[in-house]
Image: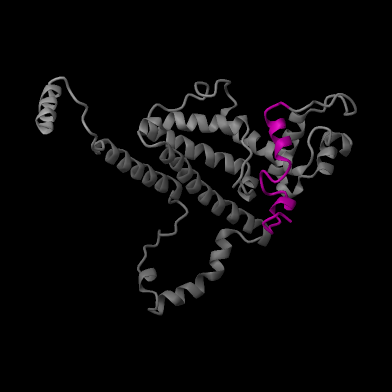
Amino acid sequence: MAKDGSTAATAGTATGSGDIARSLELLWGTGDRPSRGPKPGLTLDRIVTAAVAVADAEGLAAVSMRRLSTELGTGTMSLYRYVPGKAELLDLMLDRVLGEPLSSGTDPVDAAAPPADWRAAVDTMARTYLDNLRRHPWLLKINQARTVLGPSALRGLELSLTALRSMGLRDPELISVIITVNSFVEGLARTQADAAEAVRETGLSNQEFWDNQSPYLERAMLSGAYPMMASLSEDTFSAEFDHFAFGLRRLIAGFEALVEERSTEQPAEQTPEQTPEQAPEQTAEQAAARK
């Protein structure tokens, strides 16, 4: 159990819950490399790749040192020569998948060619993150409140800030733009992931689930107790409506309003500097005051 009474760390679902110093050494490549013992060909990169593959296929709970040793065809103790345990491995897995959209290049800014217009940048950020969460739904199960920042995480933040700088907002506000967009994306992705998980667990499709409720809902609408709900159009809950695109457009429109507001704001009043023309007059006034 963690110091705050939670079990997140022992359950392996909280980043930064292991040996932070060791995670940082591994992320930034400053740790000692095993010099003897492990099976030839075993590397930290292979271990992280295998862990991500298992998590993608079966969920984070399936990731264990024993399972990875089977996947990699090596002894479990060999893995511990590279990574202390699952908590530190989770830090490495997170940095790996956060860096996937950036893997096409090497330069932290130019390789990914961030959009010149901040609106396009916000759109790209949102769609890229949604795609990442769909490829790795286990990310939604992780407590990332205290992420151990590695090279990929910092590169991603660098790219985002570079693309958003033209908004002209204060630095804390730029960070808030990123948080707002990510929170919006995570919310929709979590709803989609939960729906897919419900289908797997119950064996009922979404259509079958709602069809079971239909007779009861129809009687409720005819009762007159829910006039607003009863007046909704037939396509209100249509799966064809793109809630992601709708919400993203509204977010961008809100940011546009703020950018426009900032562009028309008057700078704070400052005491004007004394000009050469003013200096003699001020000197005369001061002299008169002294008499």
Q: Residue at x 83, y 27 (%)?
A: 34
Picture quarter with the N terminus: bottom right
In front of the other: 87 or 230: 87
User: Can you give x and y, in whole percent of width and height, for residue 289 in the image?
Assistant: 11, 33
The answer to if 3 sits in the magenta stretch is: yes
Q: Magenta segment range?
A: 1-30
Picture quarter with the C terminus: top left
Q: Residue at x 67, y 28 (%)?
A: 28
Using residue 88 as the reference point, say whether residue 167 is left or right of it.
left
User: Can you give x and y, in whole percent of width and height, for residue 51 in the image?
Assistant: 74, 39
Q: Main secondary structure of the magenta part?
A: loop
Using residue 171 as the reference point, say whether residue 94 is left or right of it.
right
User: Can you give x and y, in whole percent of width and height, for residue 39 in the image?
Assistant: 88, 28
Which residue appears farthest toward the front when viewing the image?
291
Q: Quadrant of residue 225?
A: bottom left
In front of the other: 143 or 63: 143
Q: Residue at x 38, y 70 (%)?
A: 230
How was the colour assigned to the protein in this rendering? Answer: one colour
Compared to residue 53, the image places residue 111 above or below, namely above
Compared to residue 66, the image places residue 47 above or below, namely above
User: Can you give x and y, in whole percent of width and height, for residue 19 in the image?
Assistant: 73, 41
Q: Residue at x 22, y 33 (%)?
A: 271
The answer to if 115 sits in the magenta stretch is: no
Q: How many labels does the image show?
A: 0
Using residue 230 as the reference point, say whether residue 112 is left or right of it.
right
